[in-house]
Amino acid sequence: MQRNVVHEGMAQKEENTRFFISGAAITLWNILIYFSSPCSSKWQESIFGETLNYNQLKAEELIGENRLIGRLGLLATMAVLFTARFTLAAPPVLGLPINCQVGVDCYIQNFVDHDHGPGWRDYTCGSLSYDGHNGTDFGVADLVTMKAGVDVLAASAGTVIAVRDGEPDISVRQRGRNALAGKDAGNSVRLRHSDGWETQYGHMKRGSITVRAGQKVESGTVLGQVGLSGNTEFPHVDFTVRHLGRPVDPFAPAQQDCGGSEKALWDPTLVKTLSYRPTGLLIAGFSPELPRREQVDAGDYSATKLALDASSIVFWVVMFGLQEGDILEVRLSNTRGHVLASKRKKVDSNKAIAFAFVGKRNTDGVWPTGTYTGRVILYRGAYMVIDEGRSIAVH
C-alpha cells in the first residue's frame, strides 16, 4: 500500500510539472497574441507615431478583439499557473522527529502559538504554547532520560542545509540569556525538502549530531539526540516546519487562528499517537528529604527503596498543562493505607510545568517496614483529568 502511495505521488508530481510547463508555453503564446497585431497596442502606435486612416473602423475593431483575446488568455493562463504552483508545493508527509512513545516516555509540552497578540493559544485554543513560539516541543521526562540518549529523527526525506554543534547542555536559568550570543536554538539541524519546505530540529545534545551539511537523508534517519542546549529550561527537541521561510504549524498548516479543523501534515498513522493531550503527569517519585526541582531533573531521587531511618518520606510529582481553576490534590499514605500527609489547593494560573510534593518527617526514629504509596489527583470542573499513584518500599 505504501509503495502505491509513493508511485501515485510521483505520477501526480510529474503530471503537475507537465501542467506547469504547458501553462508557461500558453502564457508566452498569449503574450505574443496580445502584442503581435500591427495595430493592437499603444506601444506600436508610439513607435510609428501616426494615426491610421485606412479602414480605421476595422482596425479599431481588430484592436479591441485582439486585446480581449489576449487578456482572456492571460487571465486563464495565470489561473492555470496559480493552480499548478500550489499543487506542486505539496507539503511533505511528516513522521515523528523523535524516537519515543508520545504520551508514555515523551510528551508535547508546547505547540505553535496561534494568538496574534501578546497572549498565546495552541491550535485547539488551549494554553500549551507561549508568546511567539513557532515550533512543536517534544520533551522527555528528565535529565536522566536525556543522558541515556533519545534519538532525534528526520521527519521527512531531504538534504541537510545547516548544522550547529558545540553548545553546552545547560538550562538557560543557570547559563543566562546573554551567554547564548543569539544561538537560541542551541545545537541544531536544518533540512530542505521539496517545493520550498524546510524542517529544523533545535536544542540537541552537544556532540550527538551525526549528519553534515549537504548530506541527503531519508525519513527516520538519526540526526542526533535530544538535549538541553540553547534557550531552554528542559530537555526536548524543538521541531519547526517552514514553507518559503514562513513558520507552519504541522497540526494546522493553513490555520492562522486557533480552533479550526483541517488535515495535519503528520503521517495519517500518527493521528492517534499525536492526539491532543492538554494535561498530564510527567514523572513522580519519593525522596528522603525536602526535594528540589533541580535534583528531581538530575535523577537524584530515582531510588526504589528508602532506609528505615530516613529523615523524611516525601512524595513528589511533575506535571504539565495545569489550568487556572484546577484543583490539585497530593497524598502520602503509610503501609496500612492511612494518610500521613495531604495537600489540596486551587491552581491560581495556567502552568506549563508544575512541581508539587507532600511528605512527613520521621518523629519515631524508625519507619514501619512495608510499602508506602503516593497519589496525585487533578480535577478540572466536574472531571478528574489525572489520577495516578506510585509506591516505594521502606526496609
Image (tube, rainbow, N blue to C red):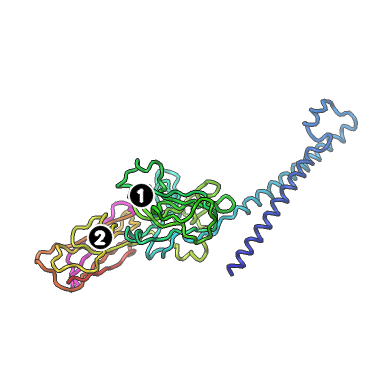
Residue 381: x percent and y percent? 33, 60
**Does residue 346 belong to the magenta stretch?**
yes
In the picture provided, is 57 more to the left or to the right than 19?
Answer: right
Q: Name the amino acid type tagged 1.
A: Pro
Q: Name the amino acid type tagged 2.
A: Asp
45, above or below 89, in the image? above
Q: Residues within 10 Å of mark 2 (few under 14, many from 20)?
A: few
Q: Quadrant of residue 103?
A: bottom left
Label whose residue precedes the other's in the sequence (1 or 2): 1
Whole-angstrom CA distance, mark 1 to mark 2, is: 21 Å
* Label ID, residue 83: none
Residue 214: x percent and y percent? 54, 51
Which one is in front, 98 or 122? 98
Quarter placement of the C terminus: bottom left
In the rendered image, the residue lying farthest to the left is 364
388, above or below 173, in the image? below
* Residue at 72% in and 47% down: 24
* Residue at 59% in and 55% down: 90
Residue 26: x percent and y percent? 75, 47
Q: Quadrant of residue 36?
A: top right
Q: Residues within 10 Å of mark 1 (few under 14, many from 20)?
A: some
* Residue at 21% in and 62% down: 287
Nearer mark to the viewer, of 1 and 2: 1
* Label ID, residue 300: 2
Instruction: Report the predominant secondary structure element of the magenta stretch.
Output: strand
Range shown magenta: 327-352
**Does residue 44 belong to the magenta stretch?**
no
Q: What residue is disc 1 on?
A: 168
Residue 161: x percent and y percent? 52, 49
Which one is in front, 76 or 306? 306
